[in-house]
Amino acid sequence: MEEALNPTELRELAAEILSENDREGRYTIPTKGLYPFQWNWDSCLTALGWTYLDEDRAWREIETLFEHQWSDGMVPHIVFHEPDDGYFPGPEVWSTGRSVPTSGITQPPVAGFVLRRLYQRCADPEEIEERIEDLVDAVDRWHAWFFENRDPQREGLVSIIHPWEAGRDNSIDWDEAFERVPTEGITDYVRRDTEHANPAHRPTKAQYDRYLWLVEHFCSFGWDNSKLHDASPFRVVDPGFNAILIRSCFDLAALAEELEMDDVAQRNYAWARRGLEALENLWSDPHRQYLCQDRTTGQLIESTSIGGLLAVFAPIRLTRAQAIAHRIEQISEECRFSIPSHDPADSRFDAKRYWRGPVWLIINYMINDGLEAADLEESSTKIVDDSLELISSSGFAEYYDPKTGEACGGGRFTWTAAMVLEFLQDQ
Ligand code: DGY
């Protein structure tokens, strides 16, 4: 049996992966082949890893992403910096008409949280003051875009209108609402993802047909964000996504306060507080966790996924955080490694298929952070231990089977490496 890697070796490997996926010192691709461009939340979480290697490079990662912010405030989920036909759907499908092509939907807004963390680690805050102020303004405009375009009834929480926006592409959470998305009339296409990763670890063809129908539908509105929310047959309020937005609003507000950007601080505190209050509507007593809400029907969705546990990333009340810690213990009893992305007791759980069961280190990181903030150290220690054990035994994979620890999806994965550097900081 191979010997487990020690923390120094793990750090070296993580740094090697970040460097090999670095492009021109400006952005980092998630992994070669499968994801050859810049992805929004991958990039932001990767910046945390860069702080251990090169602080300036960490800021640059976020700056590059925000150079491609749309004039309405949206920050796209993919920036297609260089042509690469190994990925589908590429720029010609999105057709967003930008000089450097981008996709037309967004992703979990983790940037506010990351900015604050970068600032806290910064060796000389004065030196980067102007840089950081520009970024604070840009993130503030993105937050405003969310509440303007994705919460038209001013309910305090925002919808995703495409599963790719949640980052949890094929979660069981979307199954029911996704049935409402037709597939007739979509242009013929050839998937490329299944050439780079095991098809059994990826979404199905039926799901891809619907992903594509939505893209073509939004494209027919000229990507006018003021119309897309109501025009989408798929509108879901995800507690995990909203927890990230709420946390980022709080963190951006606190950072803006330090920088004496008072308007930004006030606005973001107000969004965060309202969001936190509204999040309570997604709590389910019978399930002892938060659930997604189908915004078309107003109903909570019967699907106990990681999205409902990720709510702890926002400063929810202590009793809720304790309940989530308890749920994690419960579902982890059925798995060797925590935290599965879906409840293993659910018959729809699938240990290897992307977001229908596997463990993701970025999710472990954010949940761990929330549990630590709530002083629930006991639960958080197991999450960190399991995460590091997965890395030592199975390498820097995109995600892992929670029952066996088998590496799934893409390999030599950037944000997994970044999270390892984060988890090792106290070791
Ligand atoms: C993919 O292509 O699998 C992505 O998750 C979409 O962003």
Image (tube, helix red, strand yellow):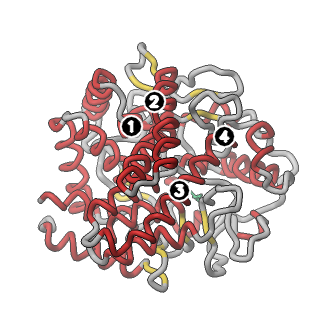
Circle 2 Cα neighbour tier, 10 Å, few/some/many (<14 / 14–19 / ≥20): many
The quarter in which the N terminus is drawn is bottom left
Residue 151 in picture, x, y percent from top left:
65, 35
Residue 207 visible in rendering: yes
Tell me which corner region of the image, top left, top right, bottom left or bottom right, holds residue 377: top left
Q: Are marks 2 and 1 in contact (CB under 8 Å)?
A: yes
Q: Earlier in the sequence, mark 2 or mark 1?
A: 2
Q: Which residue is mark 3?
A: 139
Q: Name above or below for residue 268 compared with residue 427.
A: above
Residue 350 visible in rendering: no
Residue 200 in picture, x, y percent from top left:
52, 53
Using the numbered discs, state the Cα–Cα distance from disc 2 to disc 1 in whole angstroms: 8 Å
Using the numbered discs, state the Cα–Cα distance from disc 2 to disc 3 in whole angstroms: 19 Å
Using the numbered discs, state the Cα–Cα distance from disc 1 to disc 3 in whole angstroms: 17 Å
Q: Which residue is mark 4?
A: 150
Identify the residue at horizontal 33%, vertical 25% (top origin): 317
Circle 3 Cα neighbour tier, 10 Å, few/some/many (<14 / 14–19 / ≥20): many
Circle 1 Cα neighbour tier, 10 Å, few/some/many (<14 / 14–19 / ≥20): many
Q: Which residue is mark 1?
A: 314
User: Looking at the picture, which amino acid does disc 3 mark?
Assistant: Val
Which mark's residue is nearer the viewer, 1 or 3?
A: 3
Q: Name above or below for residue 159 compared with residue 298.
A: below
Q: Earlier in the sequence, mark 4 or mark 2?
A: 4
Q: Secondary structure at mark 3?
A: helix
User: Looking at the picture, which amino acid does disc 1 mark?
Assistant: Ala
Q: Which mark is residue 374?
A: none
The quarter in which the C terminus is drawn is bottom left
Q: Name above or below for residue 101 compared with residue 235.
A: below
Which residue is situated farthest in the top direction here?
Answer: 286
